Amino acid sequence: MKSDGKKMERTIVDKALELGASVAGIAAVDDLRASKSYEIYDKSPFYAEYKRVEWRPEHRSILVWALVHPVSEPALDWWSMKVKGFTPGNGVMRLQSRKLRIWMGEELGIKALSLPDQFEDGGALLKDAAHLAGLGVIGKHNLLVTPEFGTRVRLRGIFIEAELEPTGPLDFDPCNGCDMPCHRACPRDAFRSGAFERALCRKENDKREAEAEILNGSIMGIEEPSEVVKPCRYCELACPVAQGASL
């Protein structure tokens, strides 16, 4: 199914915004498959059990959206086994995903699939999808940088059984001329080579997982106490782009 002009794309993006997305856009699955990141990941996967992901041929497009993560709400990406979606922010976005998928089927007659949480389970590299959809660009700290909210966003996506027009990429170069405070902020010096070294980043988050805290459940939106892991955000919060937008 191919869309007629850009009316369908605008309708879908507007619905995502109506349901609480901070920014949203559409990318072509073929463009995503050709992304350099997939070739790199195949050579050095995050999980040892990873096998190359094969997407369904009927999935032609991907809707990707971002939820702003204000500095004032750190618990949005705190992790707990007792929280639906494992983080409060992911719980919000999973609900948005379900509503969007149902709406597309009922109102537009388009089948869609909410992406699995893990790339290894058939998901997508959402930073690349967000770049191709025009939400932002991947900066020198290996994070998505959006014009509106900088790096302080969380991403979610839906595969769509329709050939839609991409809404990006975006002409945006926030790292040009930046003195990269994100690199200096890293507690593991994960940019020591001049590029992002995932293994060093993982060591920091492994340490934080080992130091999980028991917190009052209300902080995580649940009733009982919970063991909580607080992921590292040093490079994210050091990025100067749109610093005042997500307070």
Image (cartoon, rainbow, N blue to C red):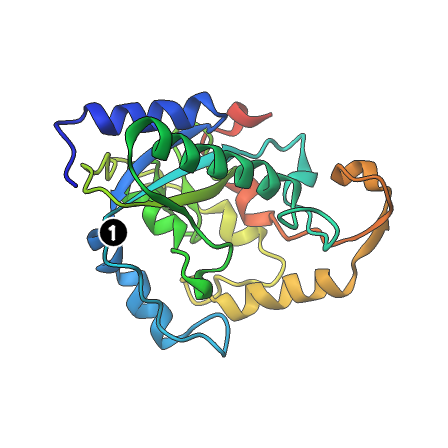
Q: Report the amino acid beneath label 1.
A: Val
Q: Quadrant of the N terminus?
A: top left
Residue placed most toward the observer, 64 or 105: 105
In the rendered structure, the answer to whether residue 81 lies left or right of residue 157 reads right
Mark 1 is surrounded, within 10 Å at the Cα level, by few (under 14), some (14 to 19) or many (20 or more) other residues, namely: many
In the rendered structure, the answer to whether residue 246 lies left or right of residue 114 reads right
Residue 233 drawn at (x, y percent): 60, 48
Q: Quadrant of the C terminus?
A: top right
Residue 164: quadrant of the picture: top left
In the rendered structure, the answer to whether residue 222 lies left or right of residue 74 reads right
Answer whether residue 234 is visible to the viewer in this image: yes
Residue 76 drawn at (x, y percent): 65, 39
Residue drawn at (46%, 29%), measured in percent from left and top? Answer: 21
> Dot 1: what SS?
helix
Residue placed most toward the observer, 3 or 13: 3
Answer whether residue 240 is visible to the viewer in this image: no
Name the residue that disc number 1 marks. Answer: 29
